[in-house]
Amino acid sequence: MEDTARLRRQYLPVLEHQHDLIELTLHQLRANRAGRRRRERRRRNWVRPWIGRRRHYGMYDQLMVELWNEDHASFTNFLRMPPAMFDELLARVGPSITKQYNFYRDPLERMRLALTLRHLASGSKYASMKFGWRVPHNTQSLVVREVCQAIIDEYVDEVLVCPSTPDGWHAIADKFYQRWNFPYTCGALDGKHVACRCPPKSGSQYFNYKGFYSIVLMALVDADYKFIWADIGSTGSASDAQIYNDCELKECAEDCTLGFPDPEPLPDDNQDVSYFFVGDDAFALQPTMIKPYSLRGMTNDQRIYNYRLSRARRVAENSFGILANRFQVMLTPMQHHPSTVKLIVKTRKEHRTMVQSGLIFMDARRVHHHPHPTHHTHLLLPT
């Protein structure tokens, strides 16, 4: 009995090893057979027949041609830009998005640009757009990324022109004083959560305090609702103060390398005051960042100060609202990877360089016009 047990203990590991080898061999044989079957399976179509009829029934070749020839106002509503601006944009980004012509397909750079602009303007999902545009959803995802990157590369040197001289900051501060009755303001700083789906293996990194997943667009806005600085891509779990404390803008403001003008007395006062940004309660009070007084125990002068500061600060919120309502892809959770969301947000922000047509400024004046006359009031700055 002892010899039998000893032999069993001796040969049992060998038998188990042989069994594992047999199982591994069978698994490899099954995988090879499945691979051969996949390779041998012939595609039924190079492209689905109804997609192949895009040139005859697709949205670009039918509806957009009609709008272009008959109704420029509807064309502008459809793509959020008039035909002339579309041609200008195509002339600049067309070489970057044009593919090589071959026997099977045309480059279609005009349709690629139009499809991207429509996706950004409407926020429609790829799965629903593929039937009207007759473009597969996976192709749309590639097109949107490529076109957005091309727009960013083309306009990167023309947007977000942050002043670097005292005269530049003076011009911004003068507009804030003229339009919003708040002197020495070099910009309104605020953050916006851009909703997106939860990225894989990210846990709660992108989950914000509002209860959804997002990336943060933090921007500095002038009195005319234009972005002059922006930070895009911070995770939704980060607060506005945390993002600002880690950004280059705060570092330059503290190092006095932004080119702010020298401190000057306030109107009807003789005490020098530094130029500053305006923010909400999320930011810490600093020489270059002012915020409202606490709501508890406010005096009448402090209440007036909070009202004036709120008028100056809300241009940032209004700018986000104008941007999101014009390009409604930012109104719904984006079903993209965070890297694509960053491209989309940058593209929409860079579109503000094309406001020469008056589209966005016209909307800003119509929506945010203050109905009451402005009364200049001596401002009490927090200490």
Image (spheres, helix red, strand yellow):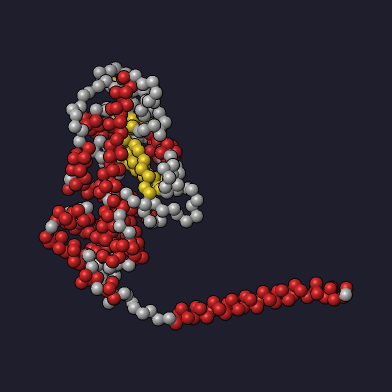
The answer to whether 285 is drawn above or below residue 87 in the figure is above
* Side of 266 relative to 11 (left or right): left
Q: Quadrant of the N terminus?
A: bottom right
Residue 256 in view here: no
The answer to whether 277 is drawn above or below residue 137 in the figure is above
> Residue drawn at (27%, 47%), measured in percent from left and top?
325
Instruction: Give percent across and percent down for residue 381.
Output: 34, 23
Q: Nearer the viewer, residue 103 or 143?
A: 143
Instruction: Give percent across and percent down for residue 110.
Output: 23, 63
**Count of numbered labels shown in the rendering:** 0
Q: Nearer the viewer, residue 249 or 48?
A: 48
Q: Quadrant of the C terminus?
A: top left
> Residue drawn at (32%, 49%), measured in percent from left and top?
331
Instruction: Give percent across and percent down for residue 280.
Output: 36, 33
Instruction: Give percent across and percent down for residue 162.
Output: 30, 40
Residue 271 in view here: yes
Furthest toward the left, the residue is 70
The answer to whether 48 is drawn above or below residue 128 in the figure is below
* Side of 128 relative to 28 (left or right): left
> Residue 165 falls in which quadrant of the image?
top left
> Residue drawn at (45%, 48%), measured in percent from left and top?
206
The answer to whether 10 is drawn above or below residue 159 in the figure is below
* Side of 243 relative to 321 (left or right): right
> Residue drawn at (36%, 47%), measured in percent from left and top?
194
> Residue 92 falls in which quadrant of the image?
bottom left
